[in-house]
Image: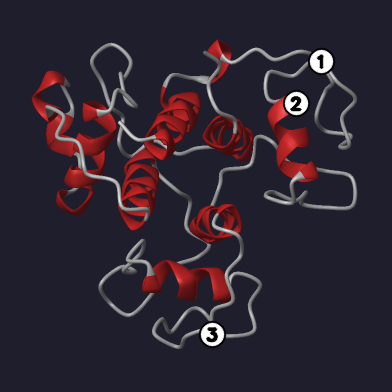
Amino acid sequence: MTFSTQRLKAGLCALFLGAAAFMTPALASSYIDVADDAWYASAVESMRSQGIMQGTGANTFSPSQITDRATVVTVLWKIAGSPATQPTTIFSDVPTDRWYAQAVAWAVEQGITYGNGSGQFRPADQITREQLAAFFYRYDLSLGNDPAMGVLDLYLDANKVSSWAVAGMRHAIGTGIVEGSDYLLSPQATASRAELAVMLDRVLTPAAG
């Protein structure tokens, strides 16, 4: 397993294994809606200081707000170093002057997103677990890493994984990223901004040892 895959595994565990497992030391929060002792406070502050995730207001982060597709593609673009990319008109719902337009164009170039198959990206749609698995799987492939082949049938709701997300979920299971809960993957469940911050913090922070 490559180092980048190890970081990816650590990051996605933050999402799929649940918030309670990731208790972090208290620190002074930059946001009034992020308690210093919140389980996600350290990750939120880390993402803010690195310029990966910004607040939703001058002093708010909205940790319980569900993450959307535009935000996820944008943070992946930032992790990649915010490479200069010419905004594209490939998607009818992504005007070239939007804050996420360059990130979406980059994601298309890297094969990370293909939209919904009808010429739309649907940037404001809430992100689901299977979408996250697919995005991070394709991002990992763009780094030159080989896909893993996990066994979906280990989970009771494997038949609920969309056909386009099967490879991503298999990769997540095969690398140990997804363990599920009570033998369930919950592929259509959504993720909050707090969960995304913790996930990204694990992606960017090498595991000790």
Judging by the rendered image, the residue that carries numbered circle 1 is: 26
Please give left or right for residue 7 compared with residue 118 in the image. right
In the image, what residue type sits under mark 3?
Gln
- Please, what secondary structure does the residue beneath circle 2 have? helix
CB atoms at circles 2 and 3 under 8 Å apart?
A: no
In the image, what residue type sits under mark 1?
Ala
Choose top left, top right, bottom left or bottom right for residue 130. top left
Question: What is the total number of numbered labels drawn onto the structure image?
Answer: 3
CB atoms at circles 1 and 2 under 8 Å apart?
A: yes
- Please, what secondary structure does the residue beneath circle 3 have? loop
In the image, what residue type sits under mark 2?
Ala
Using the numbered discs, state the Cα–Cα distance from disc 2 to disc 3 in whole angstroms.
35 Å
Foreground residue among 68 and 75: 75
Decide if residue 61 is in sight here.
no
Decide if residue 144 is in sight here.
yes
Using the numbered discs, state the Cα–Cα distance from disc 1 to disc 2 in whole angstroms.
7 Å
The crowd level at tag 1 (other Cα within 10 Å; few <14, some 14-19, many 20+) is some
Judging by the rendered image, the residue that carries numbered circle 3 is: 86
Using the numbered discs, state the Cα–Cα distance from disc 3 to disc 1 in whole angstroms.
41 Å
Q: Nearer the viewer, mark 3 or mark 1?
A: 3
